[in-house]
Image (cartoon, rainbow, N blue to C red):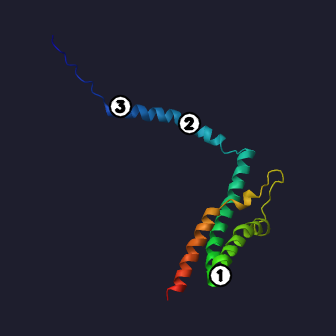
Amino acid sequence: MGTKKRAKKKVDIRKKRLKLIKRREKQQPNQDESSEKKKFKTEKEEKLEKRLEKETKMYWVRAITGALSGIIGISIGLTSWGLFFWMLAFWFGLPFIVSFAIFRFEYDQEEWNWKNIIMPGIGIFFFLFMLFAILIYTLQVIP
């Protein structure tokens, strides 16, 4: 019994690539039309975008106040429980002041929740507070 070897089909890569490019060109105009339709945002998307913008501002305010409260707290000589209560005052008090007095964000009474003000940036606040407080305290103690 003889085994027949079949010759492998040669594949012309250039032809395949041209076919793929033509397929993409045919599909491209459909994508352009769909992107034009997506330019108009629904109410839900606009609300989500506004909420995310508010949360982003609050996040960066929390990051800055975390670092500053750590630096100022150690600089004025607070340690232990005093520094802890200093941190809590900035952690829970300042976001409400910033949200209502400085930025004057408008919240829907039906959808408003205090967690929307407290939650954004808790981690970065605590991390930067601890980082800068330890750094400044170490620099004060070393010399």
The furthest residue to the right: 109
Q: Quadrant of residue 127?
A: bottom right
Say what amino acid the circle numbered 1 marks.
Answer: Leu
Crowd band around label 2 with a 10 angstrom C-alpha radius: few (<14), some (14–19), many (20+): few
Proximity of marks 1 and 2: CB atoms separated by less than 8 Å: no
Q: Earlier in the sequence, mark 3 or mark 2?
A: 3
Under tag 1, what secondary structure? loop
Judged left or right of residue 99, residue 36 is left
Q: CA distance from mark 3 to mark 2?
A: 23 Å
Across and down, in percent, residue 48 comes to: 70, 50
Q: Earlier in the sequence, mark 3 or mark 1?
A: 3
Across and down, in percent, residue 131 comes to: 55, 72
Q: Residue at x 47, y 32 (%)?
A: 23
Across and down, in percent, residue 137 comes to: 56, 81
Say what amino acid the circle numbered 3 marks.
Answer: Lys
Viewer-nearest of discs 3 and 1? 1
Viewer-nearest of discs 1 and 2? 1
- The residue wearing badge 3 is 15
Under tag 2, what secondary structure? helix
User: Viewer-proximal residue, 32 or 105?
Assistant: 105
Judged left or right of residue 111, residue 29 is left
The furthest residue to the bottom: 143
- The residue wearing badge 1 is 78
Residue 52, relative to residue 82: is it above or below?
Answer: above
Q: Residue at x 63, y 71 (%)?
A: 66
Q: Which circle marks residue 29 in the picture? A: 2
Residue 134, relative to residue 36: is it above or below?
Answer: below
Say what amino acid the circle numbered 2 marks.
Answer: Pro
User: Viewer-proximal residue, 77 or 39?
Assistant: 77
Q: CA distance from mark 3 to mark 1?
A: 75 Å
